[in-house]
Image (cartoon, rainbow, N blue to C red):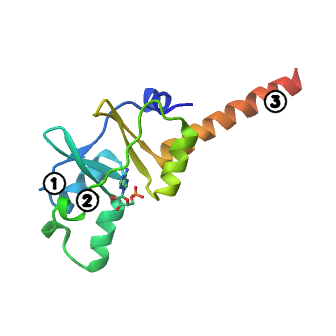
């Protein structure tokens, strides 16, 4: 199983935000799209990633989200994957880098986003299918 197989099922949409937006706007966008991360882009260039964890960090300080900009809290060195990466290596990256979101790039262009939830779902589907095949074999 490769990253491209997961993207084929879930689609290539990646939600983004600009660096000058406030964290209130980032939180609203994450709620609107039911996602936990946004890539930060300037003229189609990936300049960072902001996730719910970054928003929570600011909440914990008591600061108002409307007074803090995305560029102040985003991570600039973004870890990315490629469509040809296999699922095992992606699991390793997510675990070792301690991130739950991986933007996928192909020839420098953003072509999707893989979350740890997508990886768990894909593993679950594969196990459920194997289980079904084995049960059919046993009962045939
Ligand atoms: P997450 O577990 O994905 O919510 O992110 C935890 C922390 O890692 C946050 O500070 C994010 O900004 C950062 N982060 C998340 N995904 C990535 C990524 N693909 N590359 C670099 N940093 C990331």
Q: Which residue is mark 1?
A: 19
Circle 2: is it few (<14), some (14-19), or many (20+) Cα within 10 Å?
Answer: many
Q: Which residue is mark 2?
A: 74
Circle 3: is it few (<14), some (14-19), or many (20+) Cα within 10 Å?
Answer: few
Q: Residue at x 30, y 39 (%)?
A: 14
Q: Nearer the viewer, mark 3 or mark 1?
A: 1
Q: Quadrant of ligand 1?
A: bottom left
Q: Relative to the observer, which residue lies in front, 13 or 71?
A: 71
How far apart marks 3 and 2 lie (CA) works out to: 48 Å
N-term-proximal mark, 3 vs 2:
2
Is 118 placed left or right of 136 in the picture?
left
Q: Residue at x 68, y 37 (%)?
A: 127
N-term-proximal mark, 3 vs 1:
1
Q: Is mark 2 within 8 Å of ligand 1?
A: yes
N-term-proximal mark, 1 vs 2:
1
Q: Is mark 1 within 8 Å of ligand 1?
A: no
Residue 77, x across and y down, in percent: 30, 54
Is 10 placed left or right of 126 in the picture?
left
How far apart marks 1 and 2 lie (CA) works out to: 8 Å
Verify CB contact (< 8 Å) between mark 1 and mark 2: yes
Q: Quadrant location of the N terminus?
A: top right
Instruction: State which quadrant residue 128 falls in.
Output: top right
Vertical arrangement, residue 106 with respect to residue 25, above or below = above
Q: Residue at x 53, y 35 (%)?
A: 86
Q: Which residue is mark 3?
A: 135
Q: Quadrant location of the C terminus?
A: top right
Instruction: State which quadrant residue 106 falls in.
Output: top left
């Amino acid at each position: 199983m490769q990253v491209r197989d997961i993207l084929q099922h879930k689609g290539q949409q990646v939600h983004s935000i600009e660096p000058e937006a406030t964290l209130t706007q980032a939180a609203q966008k994450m709620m609107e799209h039911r996602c936990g991360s946004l890539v930060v882009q300037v003229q189609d260039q990936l300049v960072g990633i902001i996730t719910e964890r970054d928003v929570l960090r600011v909440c914990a300080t008591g600061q108002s989200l409307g007074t803090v900009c995305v560029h102040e809290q985003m991570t600039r060195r973004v870890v990315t994957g490629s469509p040809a990466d296999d699922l095992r290596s992606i699991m390793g990256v997510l675990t070792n880098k301690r991130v739950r979101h991986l933007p996928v790039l192909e020839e420098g262009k953003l072509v999707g986003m893989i979350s740890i939830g997508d990886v768990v779902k894909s593993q679950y589907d594969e196990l459920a299918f194997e289980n079904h095949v084995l049960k059919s074999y046993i009962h045939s």
